[in-house]
């Protein structure tokens, strides 16, 4: 019953069970015009942002001009090749020098971001990716708990305060009052040795002082915690990647390690313990390799997990 309600809700929210397939990018009629559009977007940033944001924008450019130009060139080429509107300002100011993994070379971060959007193009429809490119929040689908209804949304990670922790973010909210339960920031990554892809979780964050809300939601969702629900959505989203695992950033690899000691104290959650509960194994690049959860079973908890997995699998 839960799964039937989910599929019905997903259909209403604009998703489909049509299998995703690789498509060749659409070439704009005047690609140079789209490149100029991105250039104008960059030069006019100061007209749209507050003075502090504008100052930091150009300071970041001054600190890493070649890296920033390479990123802007990717944005311009991606926009021009597909005939997209100009990218959202959040993409223009992506902090490549401190993105995702502490200690990773900046050129590797740039490659990860480029790979992310190329993989996203395989997973998502043109319309969905174009809306995300412009900074919109998209509703992935609804799920019914015992007494409440919940919805999942996807957007650029920068749109939800996580520009350092990932490229996209998925959040779970209780529709009554739009109460936030959890937000997960992630990046799609290639597994070149396998010719496939999976995802890396940069952070999982619930609301401040939200323990009671989390407990209530877990009970209502038949024992599925909000963080686990987010992970099931991500597993569904990348199901065609065919990988039995995903990656997670450990405490030592968190980009907050770049900040001063006082700022690092904000990292209060027991990140390593959370992934240890999920049978994670140490991994050199990101911190952990985590096996994907099994969705088989007939009890309420297994059916609820399957519903969240289906939300990700049907979304395109």
Image: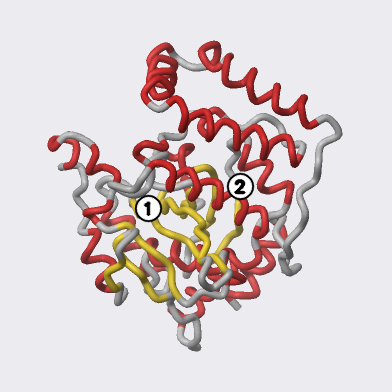
- Asked if residue 252 lies left or right of residue 301, the reply is left
Residue with the mark numbered 1: 202
Sooner in the amino-acid sequence: mark 1 or mark 2: 2
Q: Quadrant of the C terminus?
A: bottom right
Mark 2 Cα-neighbour bin, 10 Å: few <14, some 14–19, many ≥20: some
C-alpha span from label 1 to label 2: 20 Å
Q: Which numbered marker is on residue 240?
A: none
- Asked if residue 303 lies left or right of residue 1, the reply is left
- Residue shown at the point (36%, 66%) measured from the top left: 225
Taking 50 as reference, is 242 above or below it?
A: below
Q: Quadrant of residue 87?
A: top right
- Asked if residue 7 lies left or right of residue 56, the reply is right
Mark 1 Cα-neighbour bin, 10 Å: few <14, some 14–19, many ≥20: many
- Residue shown at the point (47%, 65%) measured from the top left: 147
Q: Is residue 131 visible?
A: yes
- Residue most extreme to the bottom: 298
Q: Quadrant of residue 133?
A: top right
Q: Position of residue 121 (x, y in %)?
A: 66, 53
Which is closer to the viewer, label 1 or label 2?
1
Report the front residue among 122 and 170.
Answer: 122
- Residue shown at the point (44%, 14%) measured from the top left: 50
- Helix, strand or loop at disc 2? strand
Number of marks: 2
- Helix, strand or loop at disc 1? strand
Residue with the mark numbered 2: 138
Q: Position of residue 106 (x, y in %)?
A: 39, 41
- Residue shown at the point (54%, 70%) measured from the top left: 309
């Amino acid at each position: 019953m839960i799964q039937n309600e989910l599929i019905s809700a997903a259909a209403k929210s604009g998703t489909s069970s049509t299998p995703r397939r690789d498509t060749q990018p659409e070439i704009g009629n005047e690609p140079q015009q789209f490149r100029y559009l991105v250039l104008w977007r960059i030069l006019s940033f100061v007209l749209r942002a507050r003075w502090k944001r504008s100052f930091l924008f150009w300071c970041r450019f001054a600190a890493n001009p070649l890296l920033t130009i390479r990123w802007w060139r990717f944005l311009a080429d991606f926009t021009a090749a597909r005939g997209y509107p100009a990218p959202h300002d959040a993409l223009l100011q992506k902090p490549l020098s401190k993105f995702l993994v502490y200690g990773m070379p900046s050129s590797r971060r740039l490659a990860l971001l480029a790979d992310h959007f190329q993989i996203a193009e395989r997973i998502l429809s043109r319309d969905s990716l174009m809306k995300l490119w412009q900074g919109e929040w998209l509703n992935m689908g609804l799920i019914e708990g015992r007494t409440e209804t919940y919805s999942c949304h996807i957007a650029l990670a920068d749109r939800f305060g996580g520009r350092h922790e990932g490229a996209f973010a998925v959040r779970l909210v209780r529709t009554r009052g739009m109460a936030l339960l959890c937000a997960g920031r992630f990046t799609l990554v290639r597994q070149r040795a396998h010719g496939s892809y999976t995802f890396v979780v940069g952070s999982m964050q619930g609301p401040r002082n939200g323990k009671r809300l989390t407990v209530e939601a877990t009970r209502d969702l038949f024992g599925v915690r909000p963080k686990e629900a987010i992970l099931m959505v991500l597993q569904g989203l990348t199901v065609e990647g065919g990988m039995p695992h995903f990656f997670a950033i450990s405490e030592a690899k968190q980009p907050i390690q770049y900040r001063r000691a006082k700022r690092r104290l904000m990292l209060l959650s027991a990140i390593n313990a959370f992934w240890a509960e999920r049978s994670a194994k140490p991994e050199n690049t990101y911190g952990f390799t985590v096996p994907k959860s099994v969705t088989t079973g007939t009890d309420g908890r297994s059916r609820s997990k399957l519903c969240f997995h289906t939300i990700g699998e049907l979304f395109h």
